[in-house]
Amino acid sequence: MNNTYGVHGWNQLWGGGDGQDWTQPDLHIEMAKAFERACFDYFLLEDSLFVPDNYGGTADFYLRRALRAPKNDPLPLVPLIAQATTHLGIVPTISTSFYPPFLLARLIATLDLMSKGRVGCNFVTSTAERAAQNFGLDTHIEHDLRYEMADEFVDLVSRLWSSWDADAIVTDREAGVFVDPAKVRAIDFKGRFFSSRGPLNTARPPQGRPVLVQAGGSPQGRQFAAKHMDSVIAAVSTVPEMKAFRADLRQRLVAAGRDPESCKLFFVVVPTLGETNAEAQERFRRRQAQREASPEMTLAQMGSLTDIDFSTFDLDAPLGELTTNGQQGTLKRFLAQGATLREIASNYRYGLEDPVVGTVQHVAGAMAEVMQEVGGDGFMFSGPVTRRHVAEITDGVVPELQRLGVVRTAYEHRHFRDNLLAF
Ligand SMILES: Cc1cc2nc3c(=O)[nH]c(=O)nc-3n(C[C@H](O)[C@H](O)[C@H](O)COP(=O)(O)O)c2cc1C
């Protein structure tokens, strides 16, 4: 869910109101129930830690349109979603650059205990200069160094989660022993960036290690994924890109000594549905026309991910080389979409979009075909956050995918990771 605990659908058709209720968790809880009805693996809760001011050098563009601000912390949604569901995996986003590892390990362990083993973590390095400044830095930590920190961060929190054995809590009433002290240990971690004595002051999470997810597409991001992650999200838009991403990740997993099946790779998909194929194509055409009429929406969004002010460039002049200390994988793919900014903004797709326009039967068939060709694990649905879009997917496309036998019709296991790896 993009812009998870921010403003959704305000001033838009199917937005569902006047926007005054954006602070309330009802939409997220309803979505979680719909996702569980559709037997999704997990609900990914995006987050960011700054008010963007990358377009035109001020925050005006973003604030007027409620683009990425205001936005609440999504972590308080996790227990609410856990309470409203029984099997769905829940994956909040955590910054490895700014969260203290001990606090994070404790928070996620607590949530995994509360949800009886259904929580994960989307590890991001945070990409914006403004986010770094909110945490007291003048400029952001360099991109590759952030990944070195992330690597150590995950190592440390994993050790904290293991600082209690699974059977440490014995609750032996006769002996008067709640915790067996022999089964709880300090970790005495001293790294380049972080240190922590441990042990954690809560019990081992039910999954041992909650499910780890990441979405960074740069070589460093993929390397980080190959070493630690249970699941990876790739935002690419064509079958050749999907195949190349999958081949690269699997090769890195093998090189890291892991079974490539132990990490589930999901590709972002944004379907457009209609009662007929023609109706869906008309919807897609209108969205594309809107995209072309307002390139600044795409450029402002991309600016907030890359710290580049695209308003300073001529829309129709050839664009030279650009670099970023922000999202490098995203920028590389963005710039490959055309020669000028107008072309790029018009051609840019967040995920698989063009082949998935039509009736539910058409879209489900196209998704199954693409996955057959790519040979991968599946998709992550994205798109406009409206109740209409959610229902079209969970109650339209998914039942059709179930009929095709390419997605689960029931959860088999209690724990998130077991379900994730089972299908
Ligand atoms: C589908 C997707 C979802 C992401 N969600 C978040 C997020 O919630 N918060 C965030 O700060 N970064 C998010 N990112 C950014 C990445 O996790 C990563 O930090 C960024 O792409 C920079 O890494 P890279 O240079 O390796 O591409 C997301 C990226 C993608 C592709």
Image: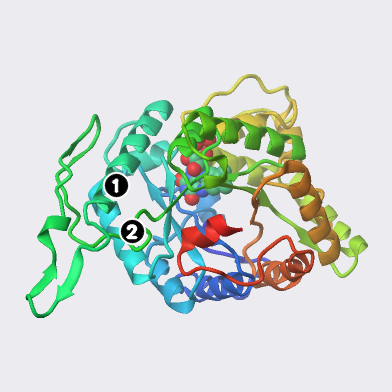
* Residue at the spot 25% in from the left edge and 53% down from the top edge: 103
Q: Which disc number belongs to residue 157?
A: 1
Above-or-below relation of 32 to 187: below
Left or right of 130? Residue 87 is right
Label 1 to label 2: alpha-carbon separation: 10 Å
Left or right of 104? Residue 390 is right
Left or right of 380? Residue 315 is right
Q: Are marks 1 and 2 in contact (CB under 8 Å)?
A: yes
**Disc with the residue nearer the chain's start (1 vs 2):** 2
Q: Position of residue 256 (x, y in %)?
A: 47, 31
Q: In the image, what residue type sits under mark 1?
A: Val
Q: Position of residue 8 (x, y in %)?
A: 57, 64
Q: Which disc number belongs to residue 180?
A: none
Q: Which residue is mark 2?
A: 108
Left or right of 280? Residue 6 is left
Query: Which residue is the extreme one toward the top?
Result: 320
Instruction: State which quarter of the image contains the N terminus.
Output: bottom right
Element under label 1? helix
Element under label 2? helix
